[in-house]
Image (cartoon, rainbow, N blue to C red):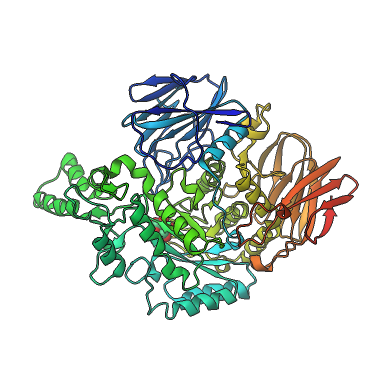
Amino acid sequence: MTSGKCRIKKYTYGTPFCTDAVVEQTAAGEGSPSFITELDNGFTYQMTPSDAVYGLGENVRGINKRGWHYVSNNSDEPNHREDRTSLYASHNFIIVDGRERFGLFIDYPGKLTFDIGYTEHNTITITAEDMNFDLYVLEGGSLKEIVQAFRHLIGRSYIAPKWAFGYGQSRWSYLTADEVREVVRKHRENHIPLDSVYLDIDYMERFKDFTIDEEAFPDFACFVEEMKKQHIHLVPIIDAGVKIEEGYDVYEEGVEKGYFCKEADGTDFVAAVWPGLVHFPDMLNPDARKWFGHKYKVLLDQGIDGFWNDMNEPAIFYSEKRIADAIDRVQEFKGKNMDLTTFEEFKAVTGTLSNNAEDYSSFYHNVDGKGTMVCHDKVHNLFGYNMTRAAGEAFEDLEPDKRILMYSRSSYPGMHRYGGIWQGDNLSWWSHIELNMHMMPSLNMMGILYTGADLGGFGADTTEDLLLRWLEFGIFTPLMRNHSAMGTRRQEVYRFESMEAMKKIIGLRYGLLPYLYSEYMKAALKDEMYFRPLAFDYTEDAFAAKVEDQLLLGDGIMVAPVYEQNAEGRYVYLPEAMKLVKFRSLTERTEEILPAGHHYVPIALDEVAVFIRPNHVLPMSYGGECVDEVDFSTLQLLGYVTDTAVYEWYDDDGYGKDYDNPANYSTFVVKADGNLEVKSEKKLNITVSL
Ligand code: GLC
């Protein structure tokens, strides 16, 4: 297959499991792949000292992945620390950029290790547990062209409804309808824009999927409607495990139809998560997937139009067998005088209960629905993908013309066609703002465009300045949600002294929406990246290649968030002259032209810095307190134009799926003297500000 300047060749090893990650037919490569050397259990490649390696999607460390080792092994890992090797996803695509430039996608759903200059500085070694996979080698073209070719190979990215580009407020958990009402009231009363409130596990009756706790949320459909009238979308969580409970229809039907994952002896595998003992729906069995996906109808029918899928690595607190064994083993330590070794053994008895590899190798999937059983550990990384696919395929059936918000915690390439992801259980740490920044372009490479992190941080107590700085980056991420864990400091913005500043920053997001939505849609429809590292555009600039804390966003802007405590600004590298716009709010801004080079840019705690590239414009609205209120037909074009700027603007109704209609595109041509020419089928009212 050739896509632009990039050629893709497929090499098949052994008998790969069909993951359905790829949607395009690809010619088989002849002989062995060029560039890399085959090993018994993988590949190796010799880098030069200056080669960079991009990719791996949701992972720890920098944008250039060199200098660490990573394991594709989807894990419920709340410690997003540098010493981790796996998070919630397996995104087995890398691009090596240096002496040679090429991309590799290893379509393999089992455990895969990427040693990228960790054991030896100049060596990449990729090893699989068995040699059964398809390897795609992408060669020719620029970094952007290789990404585009890969994205074409795996199919169009998920497109969220427009309202999901508004601000969302979440907490584990808002326990009652009244508590949700209060959150909404506080936002509306204080004019803090808001489009969604999230329902975490406690909205359910004893953590049972597709049920509602009627006491806490009486007359749920009416409540959903009441919220809709205030332009608030409620977004409930769905968990992977189905509670074992007599009389619970999802459990009983699943058992009866044989739709749960099985032990080797054919009995249903029992694990424990929030509700206690659960079965896992066999997301890899097409019939079970269809069945589970259609369960979302229970909530769709009550007016719900968005979901988040959680614990779908799948996370296991303990398995029934393992806990029985652990309880026996703990007895053995009774009365013992434990020295270091014995105490470590004692701790390991309970410390290894969760997400244990032995449990993952003890249950099976009926992968064709006809009895072909595959052990879970061979296909572990596909579980979350197929849970989200279950929902996505059902939505196509149930609501073919409507966009439903969907994002997942766990993922694998292919899932990006059905939903986005949130970046899991981060902490209220400054370094996690930086990690959020690093993940954005890496995820975009994988086709995951609808993504963002828990703003303010999920675990640990947030601080006011951290939340402010995080919001200042979060206003640019497609998913913009403030979420935090049970037991941590509350972090709704109305609880802080600097509520006014936070409110203005969130308001700015609504002002930026015409640009952000347009760039999101173009990225999805043209297989492009919404966020890019500087190295992807300024390919000849040695300084730009090293910058990891500034990102290009779409066609015309660069962002450089502050992510250090007590900082009053930061160093920024400009590969070319740019216009710096500092916003305090949608209506309060200062502008100055900065020449190319290194600058220290003061950015106060309540300011957002946006850099406009030369001969580019930034279409903005006049804001609103929810997406419905934003007038996308009255725009102000903020620009830095020395000659001519040409902007291709995308807009649509935001709810339907008529994406490819040419009427969705308009063109704005702006000259240095402010003259504007508009080509559009829409009635637009536009002013220019240069
Ligand atoms: C998991 C999720 C988190 C959620 C919690 C309770 O930790 O990652 O977002 O709040 O479960 O459902």
Q: In this view, does 243 lie to the left or right of 386?
A: left
Residue closer to the observer: 421 or 611: 421
Q: Is residue 264 above or below residue 213?
A: above
Q: Is residue 585 visible?
A: yes
Q: Is residue 679 above or below residue 230?
A: above
Q: In this view, does 271 lie above or below 124?
A: below
Q: In this view, does 48 lie above or below 151?
A: above
Tell me which residue sits at (48%, 50%) in the image: 423
Quadrant in which ligand 1 is drawn: bottom left
User: Where residue 615 appears, x then y in whole percent?
Assistant: 80, 41
In which quadrant of the rendered image does the N terminus lie?
A: top right
Residue at the front extreme of this rendering: 370
Residue closer to the observer: 351 or 162: 162
User: Where residue 312 appears, x then y in whole percent?
Assistant: 37, 53
Q: In this view, does 237 lie to the left or right of 651?
A: left
User: Where residue 444 appears, x then y in whole percent?
Assistant: 56, 43
Q: How many marks?
A: 0
Tell me which residue sits at (86%, 50%) in the image: 677
Residue closer to the observer: 14 or 522: 14
State the image quarter where residue 641 is shown. Answer: top right
User: Where residue 661 appears, x then y in whole percent?
Assistant: 68, 53
Residue closer to the observer: 565 or 63: 63
Q: Is residue 459 left or right of residue 539?
A: left
Q: Is residue 642 visible?
A: no
